Amino acid sequence: MKILLFLCLTIGGYACNTQTINKNNSHSSINKSERDKSAISKIVSDSTVDKFYTNKSKLELIDSSSLKLYDLYENFQDFNIKEFVKLELINETVYNNPITQ
Amino acid sequence: MKLFIIIPLHSNLILKSKENITLIDTILSVKLSNGSQSDSNRIDFFSSPYFEETKPQYEYIGHIDDLGVFILLLHFWEDSDYRFYSTITGKELLQTLESPEFSPKGDKFISSYTSPYYEVTDLQLCKITNTNQKEIRFETVWNIEFKNWMMVEAKNNLIWISNNTFILKVLQSNYFWNKDGDFNKENFQYLKITLL
């Protein structure tokens, strides 16, 4: 009987502990995700094209996890793409709330 | 904040025609509109019963009556493309990787294709010429393959806001896939592209 009681307490204790760890992990990942999203939102809303053109030599996207820089214009072809198109980052609000005719 | 004005897409004019199309087994037959009422005034497309690399399976997408063309989607083994045919002669006029998204004036369109294998997005700009002639002509102005960002889906992720400007909903290529093997549903960014 003592052995049975010991096993119940051990397994129960482990289960509670695991639950706590999972909860903490998920809480932590939500915070990180929210933090990343808010960081992207801030970058996009702050990064008007004129500002990029003024302060940077080229337009850049910022990787929210590794903070590497990416060139919007980079492509596999040998012609200068800037002669054909102009690329600009815009805010999500503009995309999702257009004025319809 | 400045908001853009959305103009109805010309691609809404791609309409499926029931009276001009028949599909019997693997034969897709499209009626041509050159005035003749004879049975020979049709063009037949013979689909392969299997997915093959060289012989396609034909899927009817629709007619664009304003341009005098109909569009078919050709399915190959691990590949596909869209082809434009004249409704007068049945002649193939153009090939694109994806369905067209026309500019508001309808004089050009963008076909955008995302390759999940190479993790790049191709943009193809086509212009419509000879609009005063009997048969329309398409000119591919450029094809561009970008490295660092990808569109998730062609449809519903491209919006024309003027006749020379459109917006794409994109992901950085590094964020295209999530851990479950599906494409990412977060971290979208928005590119405004102006044709110069």
Image (tube, coloured by chain):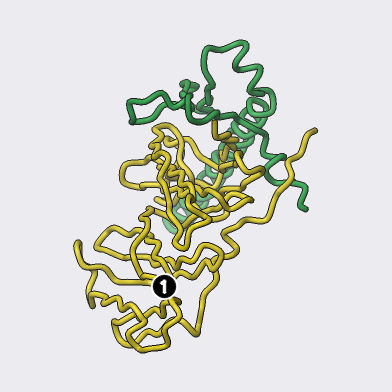
Chain colours: A green, B yellow
Identified at 38% across, 72% down, the residue is B59
Relative depth, front residue between B51 and B26? B26
Decide if residue B152 is in sight here. no
Q: Which residue is mark 1?
A: B60
Query: Residue B56 vs residue B15: left or right?
Result: left
Q: Is residue B108 above or below residue B191?
A: below
Identified at 60% across, 30% down, the residue is A89
- Name which residue type carries label 1: Tyr
Q: Dividing the image into 4 quarters, which one contains the N terminus of chain A?
A: bottom left
Decide if residue B149 is in sight here. yes
Relative depth, front residue between B163 and A43? B163
Identified at 36% across, 55% down, the residue is B95
- Residue A91 location, x and y as percent? 67, 34
Look at the numbered disc 1 and give the secondary structure of its residue.
strand
- Residue A83 location, x and y as percent? 47, 25
In this figure, what is the number of numbered marks?
Answer: 1
